Image: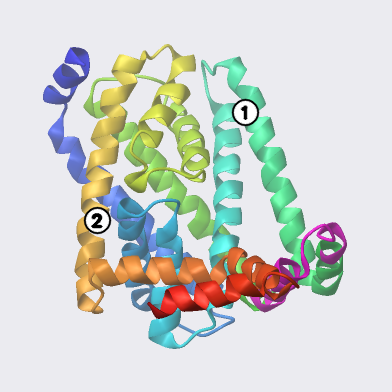
Amino acid sequence: MNEVGQALAQANIWLAIPLLGLYGLFFWMKAIRWRMLLSPIRPMTTKNVFPAIMIGTMSNNILPIHMGELVRMYCLAQQYSLKKTSVLATLVLERIFDFLSVVLLLNLAFWIGVNRPTNLDKVGYAVGAISIAMLMLTLLFVYKTKNFVNLVHKTTAFLPDGPRSWLLKQIKAGAEGLNSLKRTDLLPGVVITSVAQWVFIAMSQYLALLAVGIRVPYTACFVILAFTVIGLALPAAPGFFGTVEYCFVLALAPYGVSASQAFPAAIFYHFLNYVSATLVGLYFARRVGYSLSRIRTVADSVTEKTAIKPAFENRVRSEPGNQGLARQDSETRGT
């Protein structure tokens, strides 16, 4: 820990300025892309969607398991009277383009990079295969929705009727949110903004390395990017503390960077991102009238409404012999 503290104490703090600038560009590109993905549902401006993105990011920093994404969906749908399932579908589409963009950048870095650790090739291939499979399923969903629904219907026969019906209903309702894939005029912009936003993040991560004196090939920032994107897609603690730092350590290990060297870079990067995104998110939350308590209530409410659990519980209570559960639950709620 002494080495970590010493590295942070000697960090080039002036690099925080361009790092934060790149982070801001990342969110602006994200807002432009979301506006394009939402256009088949309702034409909007980038300024319309930007506050919801920042409120969602701030919520991810204080709430567990990516609940900020649900808060973002709810904020925009509530403010502009949009169907929540359609908005949620655009968030799914965002994730697919995110993974494809990161895989593209990772492979470009491998092709043009020098002194590339060969043991990273398998990581690129595995992530690429997963992303291609996700894209194929999405295209099947958008262009062959009925066939996709039939496929899900057959492969979910093991589920109880309640959760199964709920899942199929959500899939059908979410198809509208994926209609942007059918718009050939939108695809180039979506692809360009998807790649651009992750280039900005990779550049900001490289600045964090330079700030604490780490010198590695510039292509290493795309390896860090791939590790962090995959790591942040998994369930994590609020703010992703520990996850970001661990991803930095894993990504830099093949370049001969020790954990005691990588950790300060991760802290420098993560601290600036966390504080700036949280403060901006709180600002926009206050502007639209969302307090922290209301954000937590919204997250709990949306999670309850979008979960399969309620459908399963309703089915169980309706079965013969289980009516007592329904009465007991009703009495409990009444107390």
Residue 33: x and y in percent read 48, 66
Task: Say which residue label 2 marks.
Answer: 278
Task: Say which residue label 1 marks.
Answer: 123
Identify the residue at image location x=25%, y=68%. 293
Find out whether residue 268 is within the magenta segment.
no
Residue 80: x and y in percent read 42, 86
The answer to whether residue 232 is above or below residue 24 is: above
Depth check, mark 2 against mark 1: the one in front is 2
Residue 298: x and y in percent read 38, 71
Q: How is the image coloured?
A: rainbow
Dot 2 amino acid type = Thr
The C terminus, quarter of image: bottom left
Residue 14 sits in quarter: top left
The answer to whether residue 103 is above or below residue 58 is: above
Identify the residue at image location x=70%, y=67%. 163
Q: Residues within 10 Å of mark 2 (few under 14, many from 20)?
A: many
Depth check, front residue: 125 or 145: 145
* Disc 1 element: helix
Q: Upstream in the sequence, badge 2 or badge 1?
A: 1
The answer to whether residue 68 is above or below residue 114 is: below
Cβ–Cβ below 8 Å for labels 2 and 1? no
- What is the chief secondary structure element of the magenta stretch? helix
Q: Residue furthest bottom?
A: 81
**Residue 190 tag number:** none
Q: Residue 299: in sight, yes or no?
A: yes
The answer to whether residue 284 is above or below residue 252 is: below
Give, as a single range, the part of the protein colored magenta: 153-175
Residue 166 sits in quarter: bottom right
Residue 319 sits in quarter: bottom right
* Disc 2 element: helix
Residue 216: x and y in percent read 39, 20
Identify the residue at image location x=40%, y=66%. 299
